């Protein structure tokens, strides 16, 4: 048999599901692939913890370094998460000439350039299909199938928790706090949901998508991010009246100033394919001159989808070991300019609470004009002595939009800037 010894770093939700698949479906995997995938050992923090899988004959250890160094382990799978000690262990495996499969988006976004270079030096594979989009195949299409395409933009709903929350708010009028609690009750959100709702999780994934999509390394520190904590049911309702849905998107694009990547809520036209993505589903939308538009959608989180992506990488890495030759194409990056977000053209939706009196709109229009931002549309609703103004701007540099917002905020006639959300559309 073509036996490959596997060592797992971590046995949580994804790791536990993967172990179950490798043990329970061993015969089926062997019949389909010709591979005898044997889990040799599992490194965990607490070996006494009860786990939802059987691991007969598999060593369980707290010494992760010894697992990496074990000569019986041909292939290391890292599903422990975080950068420390995962980064050190992955680098140790690669430098020892062992291929690594990981689902760790934080690690790849932060240290991917270093780890990919280490894999290249050792002539082994570093595979991370599960790091973005869970069970959605997106890493291979970007790095292999579309390697010859001049991609212009990649946009994605890459965090199921936030999409679930926004779906509940838009479809049922649920308040943010209640929608978040529902996500936690269903297991979509962690007890501490900060990484999800702040946009940090999506930023790590956007960094990876931008790097692969444009062939230049975009580190996590080059991805500004804003979360959904300030999104209200009021703005979701107003957005719908204007023909938009609100989504948290990771956006990577090739601009005149260089490659840009960012994460923030956007107003998206309701006829855009991503606007129809509901619940905890993830979706990634790719644009290019030859392919026009491609949409990849599916379950983006959870043990089963993510373990499926990890298992696919394990099979590829195992085949490479047995072939003694490169099977998975290596990922390479070329130097390129990275755009400062301030130079990127954006559009804005701004909701203002203003004094309901003559001349207010003229003052606000003048403030936008002084920042060289033109207004596309205005909608006003009066309520006694106060009025609500909804403004959608034309496209202008992000710095100009921010300047306009600050000028408006300082006007005496403006009681409050209630919301400011970017608009993503093909219109100028």
Image: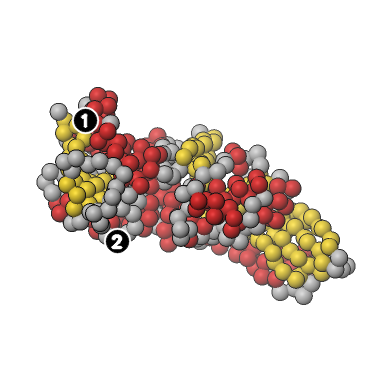
Q: Name the residue that disc number 2 marks.
A: 84
Q: Mark 1: few, some, or many residues within 10 Å (few <14, many ≥20)?
A: many
Disc 1/disc 2 C-alpha distance (Å) = 32 Å
Please tell me whether residue 282 is drawn above or below residue 33 in the rendered image: below
Measured as percent of width and height from the top left, residue 156 is found at 51, 46
How many tags in the picture? 2
Q: How is the image coloured?
A: secondary structure
Q: Name the residue that disc number 1 marks.
A: 35
Is residue 313 visible in the rendered image? The answer is no
Q: Which mark is residue 363?
A: none
Q: Nearer the viewer, residue 124 or 390?
A: 390
Indicate the quadrant where residue 417 lies. bottom right
Measured as percent of width and height from the top left, residue 406 is found at 66, 70
Residue at 40% over, 39% down: 305
**In the rendered structure, which disc, 1 or 2, sits on the residue that comes first in sequence?**
1
Residue at 60% over, 39% down: 276
Please tell me whether residue 395 is drawn above or below residue 126 in the rendered image: below
Q: Considering the numbered disc 2 on the image, is that residue within a helix, a strand or a loop?
A: loop
Is residue 324 visible in the rendered image? The answer is yes
Residue at 15% over, 54% down: 66
Q: Nearer the viewer, residue 200 or 193?
A: 193
């Amino acid at each position: 048999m073509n036996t490959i010894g596997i060592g797992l770093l971590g046995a949580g939700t994804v790791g536990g599901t993967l172990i179950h698949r490798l043990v329970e479906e061993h015969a089926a995997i062997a019949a389909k692939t010709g591979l005898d995938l044997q889990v040799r050992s599992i490194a965990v923090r607490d070996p006494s913890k009860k786990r939802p899988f059987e691991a007969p004959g598999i060593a369980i250890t707290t010494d992760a370094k010894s697992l990496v160094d074990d000569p019986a382990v041909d292939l290391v799978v890292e599903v422990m998460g975080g950068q420390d000690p995962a980064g050190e262990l992955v680098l140790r495996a690669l430098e020892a000439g062992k291929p690594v499969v990981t689902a760790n988006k934080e690690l790849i976004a932060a240290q991917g350039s270093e780890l990919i270079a280490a894999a290249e030096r050792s002539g082994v594979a570093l595979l991370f299909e599960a790091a973005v989009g869970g069970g959605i195949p997106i890493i291979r299409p970007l790095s292999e199938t579309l390697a010859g395409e001049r991609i212009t933009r990649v946009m994605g709903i890459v965090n199921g928790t936030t999409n679930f929350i926004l779906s509940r708010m838009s479809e049922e009028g649920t308040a943010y706090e209640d929608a978040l609690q529902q996500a936690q009750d269903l297991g979509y959100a962690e007890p501490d949901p900060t990484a999800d709702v702040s946009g940090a999780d999506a930023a790590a994934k956007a960094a990876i998508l931008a790097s692969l999509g444009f062939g230049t390394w975009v580190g996590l520190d080059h991805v500004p991010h804003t979360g959904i904590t300030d999104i209200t049911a009021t703005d979701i309702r107003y957005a719908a009246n204007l023909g938009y849905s609100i989504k948290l998107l990771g956006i990577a694009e090739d601009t005149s100033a260089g490659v840009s990547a960012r994460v923030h809520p956007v107003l998206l036209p309701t006829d855009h394919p991503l606007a129809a993505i509901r619940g905890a589903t993830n979706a990634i939308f790719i644009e290019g001159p030859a392919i026009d538009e491609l949409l990849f959608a599916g379950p983006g989180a959870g043990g089963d989808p993510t373990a499926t992506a990890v298992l696919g990488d394990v099979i590829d890495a195992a085949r490479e070991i047995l072939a003694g030759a490169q099977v998975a194409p290596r990922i390479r990056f070329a130097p390129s300019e990275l755009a400062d977000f301030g130079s990127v053209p954006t559009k804005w939706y701004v909701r203002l609470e203003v004094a309901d009196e003559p001349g207010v709109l003229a003052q606000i229009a003048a403030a936008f004009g002084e920042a060289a931002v033109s207004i596309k549309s205005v909608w006003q609703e009066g309520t006694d002595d106060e009025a609500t103004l909804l403004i959608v701007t034309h496209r202008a540099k992000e710095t100009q939009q921010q300047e306009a917002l600050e000028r408006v905020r300082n006007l005496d006639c403006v009681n409050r800037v209630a919301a400011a959300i970017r608009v993503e559309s093909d219109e100028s």
